[in-house]
Structures are given as C-alpha cells and as structure tokens.
Image: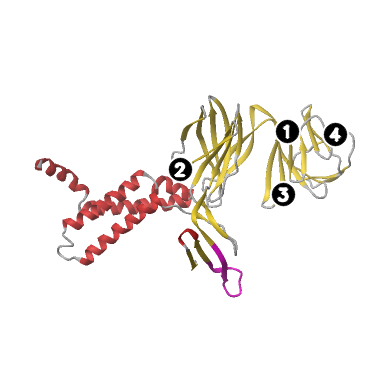
Amino acid sequence: MKNFIDKIKKYLSPLFNTRAAGLYILLFAAAIGTATFIENDFGTSAAQKVIYKSWWFELLLVLFAITIITNIFKFRMIQQKKWPLFLFHGAIIIILIGAGVTRYFGFEGIMHIRENNTANSFLSSNAFLKFKVNKNNETYDFDEPVLFASLGNNSWTEKYLIDGDLITIDVKEFIPNPKQMLTESIDGRATLQIVVSGANGREEYFISQGQTKRIRNVIYNFKNTRLPNAINIRFRNDSLQFHSDKTLTQMEMVTQRRDTLLPSGTYKSLKLKSLYSDGVNNFVLADFKKKGKIHIVSENSKVRNESLTALLLDISVNGNSKEAYVYGSRGVEGRPQQLNFDGLDMAVSYGAKEISVPFQVKLNKFIMEKYPGTNSAASYASEVTLVDDAKSVNLDYRI
C-alpha cells in the first residue's frame, strides 16, 4: 500500500510543485490577456464562452488552488510561523473560493425601480430560452439557461415529453446584430423593400406578393384586390404598379425631380428609389426582387450590451418540424414567437429571465451629480430601504 501511495505522489508531484504554480500563473495571465482581445473584437459573451466559462479555464484554477494548498503544507508555513507567506497563499485560496461560489451559486441582473416604488424581482444578466406550451387548456412553462456567442460552438439540442407529445428544440444558428437582406431565390416570390424614417433613423421592412402590412400609419397591400385608404401594389407584365386614394408627391432620388400624383381609378407606375409622401408619411421603395427571399444575416460580429441577437430554431412536435427566428438582447425579456402545431400552441422567446427574491427593495431617492457647468454625470447614488416582512427587517442603505 505504501508503495502504491509513493507511486501516486511521484506522478502527481510535478503537477503541484512550485514550478507548476508558476506555469499556472503564466497560463492564467495568457488566458485573461487573450480574453481581453476577444472581448474587444467579439463582445463579453464570446470571452465568457471561449475563456472564462470553459472547462479548461476552470481546471486551470482548480490545479492552481491545489498547488497553493500543497505548498502551504510542504513548506510548513504554519508550523514554522511564516505568517507573511501563509497570509499571501491563504488570500489566494480565499479569492479562488469566492470566485467559485460566485460562478456556481451566484446570479446577477438588473432591478428596475422608480422613486417611491418597491420591487422584489429583477431581470437576469444571463440569457434563457423560454417556452410556454398550451395543450388541452393546460399551460406548461419551462426554460433553459444558454450562452451563445460570436465565437465557439453554438449547437444546442433538447427534447421534452409533454402530455404525450415529443418536442425537439434544435438551435441551428446564432446571429449577432441580425439584419434582413433581400436576395433572389428559386423558390422566392415578388418582394419589395420599404424604407421609412423611424425614431432611431432608417427602418427597413419587407412585403411579399399576397401580403398586407401596416407600417407606421400606412397600410401596404400587395394583392390584386384593392383596399381603401391603403397603398395598393401589384406586379403585372414585369412592372410594378400602385394605386392610392390620397394625393402623393413623388421625388426621384437621383434627379430630384418632383411630381404630384392625384388619386384616380387607375394604377400608376411605381418607381424604385423614389421618395413618396402623403404630407405626413414618407416612404421609399428601395429594392424589388421578382423571386425574392428574405435572409437574416449578421451585420457585425461584436455583441455589445445593447446589441440585438437572433437564434434560428428548428422546432419539431412529433416529427412535424417548423423553423422560427427568435430575438433577444442582454438584460431584456425576449418577444415570444408564436408557433402552432396540431392540438398544441407554443411560444418561444430568448432573453433575460425575471427572477423573484424573498425581499423587497424600495427606492426612496435617486441622486445624480453632474460636473460643474455640464450635463455630464459625475456620480450616481440611490437611497434605498431593504424590506423583509418575514424576518421583520427594515434597513436603509445608500448605494
């Protein structure tokens, strides 16, 4: 038995000696240095996925912690009262334990509170895929924590058996900063790109033949049958035509030529890259494809805190498969995408999850100090009260 233990010590000793500790420190420094460049180019989520939350990074910290503990006993720091050295090594152990507790047992997010109001829930900083299934007047809610990024493997598959129905969820693609693009496709149909001015600048929309859409305050009807008070569009004899009950002005973007189009019973020629206006609403028909299909592509690979991201999901219920795009961003609840199957309705969303806590926080006052002579904020402060009726706690704090 003693020989067996000696052999184990012989093989494990190189992993936990002083040289190994130095190597682990160098590898740790190289890893976080690399993570800094990854975060700068691809966003925080990519650095977390590839470095900080990877199995090998966690293994590196575990080996480093074991090495520190081994050296404490090997060099008899307590017995020989090497207190400065022991304090240094002990501090590293405490830091690593704290990091582990935060990593595996902690959670964080944003709690939105207005002055004189209370809250007992917050939106998680981590992302979740959330599902709500309705069948036979029964509702089933469940969610899964996920981490998708511009780098790394984003494949994710899960199966659920709900009331006898087998549901399979497969993430086919992660798209950072998604943007719709109109391209030619064999199985496509006549599709227009409509550009309007919104609160955040240029907004792009698409309408295909056979559809009717309301964009802002205007109804666009791409059908052969007319709708009153709508921009009626049709595609005939390889030409686009439109009809409107309102007087429109038309300005060609290239020549700046203006025309006034009075309402009549006939269709008029529709010109691409021309600005149309009814005096209140402005729109440009920017592009048209005879056999168009809308594809979602990434506009930028870097995921910022405010970035919108999208997932292409393949959802199957008892072998009946449908594709769906769901959108989400950090710290915001995703908008549910509705899917209908035989006898089963499903809502899928991607984003933050609302988490309740067993206490309440009341915001008494929010304080923002500015730099003298400017509107730039110098500091923020919140006067809050922590309320826990179950434990008779009522404490004031300044954050």
Circle nearer the N terminus (1, 3):
3
Say which of 210 and 95 sits in front. 95
The answer to which quarter of the image holds residue 99 is: bottom left
Q: To which residue does mark 1 refer?
A: 211
Residue 384 sits inside the magenta stretch: no
Instruction: Tell whether 43 sits left or right of 139.
Output: left
- Between label 1 and label 2, give the one nearer the viewer: 1
Q: CA distance from mark 4 to mark 2?
A: 51 Å
Report the disc number at residue 197: 3
Identified at 39% across, 53% down, the residue is 102
Disc with the residue nearer the chain's start (3 vs 2): 2
Q: Magenta region: which residues?
A: 362-383
Q: Which residue is denoted by mark 4 in the rendering? A: 267
Residues 246 and 288: in front is 246
Residue 133, relative to residue 120: is it above or below? above
Q: Which residue is mark 2?
A: 151
Q: In this rendering, does residue 387 appear at all?
A: yes
Q: Residues within 10 Å of mark 4 (few under 14, many from 20)?
A: some
Image coordinates of residue 177 in percent, x first then y, are: 56, 45
Residue at 74% across / 46% down in the picture? 216
Three-letter amino acid code of the residue under disc 3 = Ser
- Please name which of the two marks, 1 or 4, marks the residue nearer to the observer: 1
Work out whether residue 253 can be spotted. Answer: no
**Image quadrant where one finds the N terminus:** top left
Q: Indicate the secondary structure of the residue bearing disc 1.
A: loop
- What sort of colour scheme is used for the picture? secondary structure
User: How far is mark 3 from mark 2, CA to CA?
Assistant: 34 Å
Q: Where is residue 176 shown, x and y percent of the image? A: 54, 44
> Residue 190 vs residue 242: left or right?
left
Badge 1 local density, few (<14 within 10 Å), some, or many (20+)? Answer: few
**Residue 302 percent coordinates (x, y):** 51, 48
In this view of the protein, which residue sits in the foreground, 31 or 399? Answer: 399
